[in-house]
Image (spheres, grey):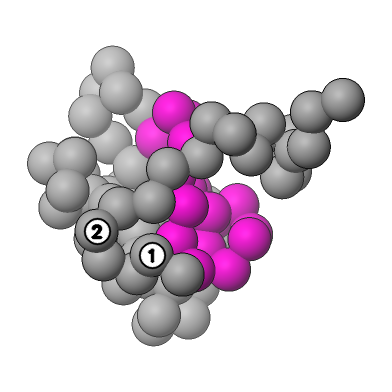
Amino acid sequence: MKTTLDGVDITTLNKLPKYRENLLVSDDYIFSYLTKVAVIDHEKREILVDTWFSSTTSKHINYVGQEYNYKVVKLY
């Protein structure tokens, strides 16, 4: 039985060099403090954020955008 985090197999989650303790990234999602906070659209090279988050979580999202060279799009 696979262990999942919000429906994502935790063995597929990656840690980036910065914010290693509280930031996880799957192929399609960004997790901050174990909460799914953004969707990664690789075709459009965008990170989609549909709600406001704290400054720390926003730093996590923006950091992934910088690492991937993707635009962060706020949908709220």
Rendered view: 28 above or below 29: above
Rendered view: 16 above or below 56: above
Q: Quadrant of the N terminus?
A: top right
Q: Which residue is drawn at 24% across and 58% down?
A: 17
Q: Residue at x 28, y 17 (%)?
A: 43
Q: Which residue lies furthest to the bottom in this view?
A: 55
Specify the label residue 20 is tagged with: 1
User: Left of 1 or right of it: where is 76?
Assistant: left
Q: Where is residue 56 in the image (x, y as percent from the top left)?
A: 40, 80
Distance from Cα at disc 2 to Cα at disc 1: 6 Å
Residue nearest the viewer, comparing 33 with 47: 33
Residue nearest the viewer, comparing 75 with 55: 55
Q: Where is residue 47 in the image (x, y as percent from the top left)?
A: 34, 42
User: Left of 5 or right of it: where is 14?
Assistant: left
Q: Is the magenta stretch mostly helix, strand or loop?
A: strand
Is residue 76 something one can see in this rendering? no
Residue on which disc 2 sits: 17
Q: Which residue is drawn at 71% across and 45% down?
A: 5
Is residue 40 something one can see in this rendering? yes
CB within 8 Å, label 2 to label 1: yes
Q: Is residue 4 magenta?
A: no
Residue nearest the viewer, comparing 3 with 76: 3
Which range of residues does the magenta coloring cover?
22-40
Task: Specify few, some or many for label 1: CA neighbours under 10 Å numbering under 14, 14-19, or 20 or more.
Answer: few
Q: Is residue 30 magenta?
A: yes
Rendered view: 27 above or below 69: above
